[in-house]
Image (cartoon, rainbow, N blue to C red):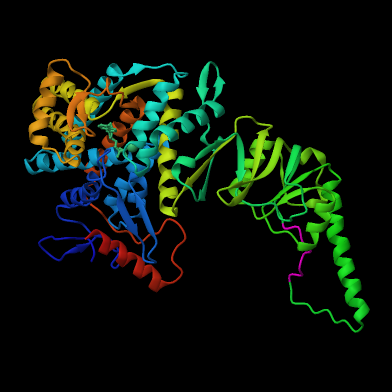
Amino acid sequence: MSTTIKTNAKPVLIMKEGSGADTVKDSQLNSIAAARAVSEVMKSALGPKGMDKMLVNKFGDIIITNDGRTILQEMELQHPVAKMIVDIARTVDDEVGDGTTSSVVVAGELLGKAEELIKKGIHPTIIVEGFQKAAEKALETLESIAWSVNVEDEGVLKKIAATSMASKIVSSYKEHLSEIIVSAIFSVEKKVDGKCKVDLDDVMIEKKLGESLASTKLINGIVVTKEVVYPAMPKSVEKAKIALIGSALEIKKAQFDSKLVIYDPDQVEELIEQEELIIKGIVDKIAGTGANVIISGEDLDKKAHYFLAKKGILTVRRVKKSTMEKLSKATGGKIITNIDIITEKDLGHADLVEERCMGGDKMVFVEGCKNPHSVAILIRGANQRIVDEAERSIHDALCVVRDVVQEPKIVAGGGAPELEAARAIKKFGITLTGKEQLAALSYADALEVVPRILTENAGLNSIDILPQLRSLHEAGDKWAGMNVLDGKIQDMKQLEVYEPLSVKTQIIKSATEAVSMILSIDEILATGKVKEKPPADKETKEAARQAALNAMF
Ligand code: ADP
Ligand code: MG
């Protein structure tokens, strides 16, 4: 297809034939429908009573999760506007780490309201303006109802972590995990100009199958999920000087095919001796720096085991790159790729490096690192899916506690802040004129989707409950919300369902931004140009163009 303008005479072609340009009739409504379809999928996942999704890829790999970003990322979306919904979840996750499902659900609801307004003949530009004014009012309201907390108040921080995990598979262990999460944040936080700063890179998350989530532990240092390579090596080294090696400790093979012809059996022995000498030379070089521990990201020649054991060097090999980087940061050691230039200055330091047995598996713990702001959470669980989902949930909980220590303002959840914001927008909306007022009032209705879906996911009737909640808010009960666990309306602040203010504001900002962008699109044009890496040949290019067009229409 191509873009044409019909005149009285012949149609005029305005884009190159075959370039894939196209206009879409009712394109706005199409885009809205695509984006809403995605958000609709997410509704049933919202809140503590929300359901999980089982994601199965073409190889049959399974992920079971409630994490908004993961669900959206794994769905193979094609429509370009539907993909914009995934971006909302990504932004919210990157900025604050929680609230992904809410942001997508709110965006979907806003688009639904926009659709009704477009059908009534209101221009999208007016809708966008109305929505943006309403969003400002919502942000202002959230700021005004939020309260400040003491960043050292362990109790409050644990409640925040627990609220974030309430909606996950791990919720039965939320007390134990909250304790670990808050201790982890306390260990890695730094004070900069009187303010707390947390770099979540300092918290290492390691997973090991076995036992149960109740055995998940906080380790004051780094965990290397490998064992010491050779039984005769020491299993525990105090005041460790650690060489972090990034290259294989073995004899380099020639890069090209080569043959070595040996005529005399003695030469075989000589050759082995030569190889041993080279390996011994490498070991001597490292040992010469004073290193008593070697942690290598690569493999290790078997011949080196004996020499290293003889020198009393605890050695671990084939360690993950991400762990090597964490070790480098924590111990202050450099990752060495050229053994010839290793010096004492390159070594990292830790009070103790020790191999321990955990649930039948041996692991190496690096504790009391030079940089004390390094901890590890070792997740244990009965199966891979549980430990994977626990990792995602722990990540969210770490993020919310970090958010609060960095910006110590919180609100209560259960739909209460959304109801309060909606009430304020409705009051403010009356002051707007004409169509903008309609848009702002629709925005308020859309925000109520949070308490509505929380209620519906708990199997309760939102038609009965929402009006009661609205009346309570009208009467000044600003924390009235839905306690979905007991199925009744309650004061969410008293119930101590706490959430960071920053998560709530980010949901509003990201959803409004994306919806405004979607509403500002009036046509989708398939272009022939590809930004990155052009397809190799003409056929692939044509296939890519066709795929893009099919995705859209
Ligand atoms: P998101 O990805 O948006 O964080 P969740 O599935 O984690 O989605 O659900 C978050 C919502 O669940 C928030 O609105 C939060 O206030 C609410 N929530 C958490 N715990 C409770 C509770 N005990 N009662 C009612 N609502 C709760
Ligand atoms: Mg959440």
Q: Position of residue 61 (x, y in %)?
A: 39, 62
Q: Is residue 301 above or below residue 446?
A: below
Lateral position of residue 70 relative to residue 490, left or right: right
Residue pictured at 31% horizontal, 36% vertical: 510
Residue 534 rendering spot, x and y as whole percentages: 44, 63
Q: Nearer the viewer, residue 150 or 484?
A: 484
Asked if one can make out residue 99 in the rendered structure from this viewpoint, the answer is: no
Number of marks? 0
Where is residue 158? Give x, y as percent.
41, 27
Dividing the picture into quadrants, the one containing residue 22 is: bottom left
Q: Position of residue 149 (x, y in %)?
A: 39, 17
User: On the rendered image, what quadrant is the C terminus found in?
Assistant: bottom left
Say which quadrant the N terminus sits in.
Answer: bottom left
Task: Judge by depth and name the residue closer to the eye, 512 or 257.
Answer: 257
The stretch of residues the image draws in magenta is 248-255
Residue 173 appears anywhere in the view: yes
Please indicate whether residue 57 sits to the left or right of residue 493 in the image: right
Residue extending furthest toward the bottom: 263
Q: Is residue 51 above or below residue 60?
A: above
Residue at position x 12%, y 27% in the image:
437
Q: Nearer the viewer, residue 56 or 167?
A: 167
Left or right: residue 106 versus residue 393 is left
Q: Quadrant of residue 187?
A: top right
What secondary structure is the stretch in magenta mostly built from? loop
Residue 175 part of the magenta-drawn span: no
